[in-house]
Image (spheres, rainbow, N blue to C red):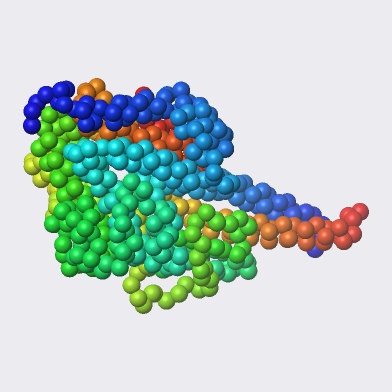
Amino acid sequence: MAAPDLRAQLDSLLLQLFRDLEELEAKRAVLNARVEEGWLSLAKARYAMGAKSVGPLQYASRMEPQACVHVSEAQDGLQEFRVVRPGAQTPEEVGPREAASFSLSLLPGLRRRKGPTRPPEPSEAPQDPLNWFGILVPHSLRQAQASFWDGLQLAADIASLQNRIEWGRSQLQGLQEKLKLEPRAA
Amino acid sequence: MLECSELYFNVDHGFLEGLVRGCKASLLTQQDYINLAQCETLEDLKIHLQTTDYGNFLANQTNPLTVSKIDTEMRKRLCREFYYFRNNSLEPLSTFFTYMTCSYMIDNVILLMNGALQKKSVKEILVKCHPLGRFTEMEAVNIAETPSDLFNAVLVETPLAPFFQDCMSENTLDELNIELLRNKLYKSYLEAFYKFCKNHGDVTAEVMCPILEFEADRRAFIITLNSFGTELSKEDRETLYPTIGKLCPEGLRLLAQAEDFDQMKRVADHYGVYKPLFEAVGGNGGKTLEDVFYEHEVQINVLAFNRQFHYGVFYAYVKLKEQEMRNIVWIAECISQRHRTKINSYIPIL
């Protein structure tokens, strides 16, 4: 391949990489904000309901996940992650993802599911975790749930983005090697 | 009852009233809260609390200090004070104190039942129960399957027994029914407490009845607000409203039909006390209805101390102390989450 072509390819790859990095930064900031909001809403719920009414006493150690990570292959061979609900209306829990470099260890960790979307659940829909705290829960608890769910979606996007960035970097290195090996233009 | 409590009150209850007024004077001031809000870590908070009346109550806590430990220790401290009052009291003040502990007992029973539903061990939950609501039959609560089981086997000997009248049913205890049980028990309790205060008459009735009426109305509003979007039907909702407040009967009937916050607000607009409270919701401070109600509660509890020779000071002191605990826990949470924007949302008391 001619050197100018290679260089053009290198440039466009670099630009794409920077765009991805910028998107990653923005998404990370939003994720942090959502998770912080979620925790503050939990604190507000504790204020309204009593400090011991919103805590580990209210949930069992074994639970049904409300969200599954769906891994799919995009056309360029990259893995894409999406968070899907296995039929339930309002989710909260998260399954730890292996490709994500950060851990959402704040949320109750559960068994994770990977692979193509499962067939619809044969038994009853997983119970809404909001009901662990009673039927009449304050608004702040619902807000916490919504914030954590948003954070979940973002986490999946960030994982996909990070994958793309890794791939982009390896492509970049490959191209740079090739460029070194090219005979210098006269 | 003779309407001259000034002549007879101090014989039996003067020492305790003096004591509770002294305790009230040691509640945290605005300056204390400002100092606490400036702390960077929970250890700083502990050091600042040592300079207040709390003293070294966290001295025996192992590292790391958590918000939950602070809350537990504060509760234990309040419990020690309360039991001192109760052990030194005579009738009818002792019955008054028993009524005060019933609300905590109800919370503990519900906590134990929920724990049984989640298959938690009884020991784990007993540690987290509110110390003010401790009673001897607590460990047996988790064996009950239905409310009538619960009553016949466990609670028939406790002070909660008279409140089970409306709650006896053969439904198994799942989340919805536990919630209904909690609210029905609380409704019966509130009505019984109100009747006790009213029958006592005198300054106690003049001070306590408005406080309990506000509590009843507050519960009605909060139940309504939290039931929007849940599976609780309107008829069920109406059975949970206590009937001793200003809202009974027209307001409660209207509230039972409300379907969103604006409709609830329109109901509140009919009542001079509640209209300004609802108008304060939202605004630029982002206050919720619960916040506004807590503020109002603090105001009426502080006013209870303006009258002498009545039992309301004890109730008011415990409620003010609870608000103080909520404030400290809120500040501690903001510090530990390093999210300081809302750290000043506590409600100052003195």
The residue lying furthest to the front in this view is B11
Tell me what residue is drawn at x 37 percent, y 52 percent.
Answer: B129
As drawn, A166 above or below B49: below
Does residue A119 appear to the left or right of B114 in the view shown? right
Establish if B219 lies above or below A5: above
Query: Which residue lies at the image location 41% right of the left edge and 65% below the top edge?
Result: B121
Q: Residue at x 49, y 38 (%)?
A: B57
**Which residue occupies the foreground of this view, B20 or B104?**
B20
Q: Relative to the observer, which residue lies in front, B318 or A106?
A: B318
* Quarter of the figure with residue A3: bottom right
Depth check, front residue: B303 or B180: B303
Is B113 situated above or below B325? below
- The quadrant of the picture occupied by the N terminus of chain A is bottom right
Q: How many marks?
A: 0
Measuring from the top left, give residue B212's x and y in whole percent: 19, 37
Please report the residue visible at 58 percent of the width from the left and 69 percent of the height from the top: A73
- Report x, y in % for residue B71: 44, 43
Quadrant, the C terminus of chain A = bottom right
Q: Is residue A143 left or right of residue B110?
A: right
Residue B20, position in %: x, y? Answer: 32, 30
Q: Residue furthest right?
A: A186
Give residue A49's position: percent from left, percent from top. Answer: 34, 46
Can you see residue A139? no
Q: Is residue A67 visible?
A: yes
**Based on the displayed image, in which of its 4 quarters is residue B168 positioned?**
bottom left
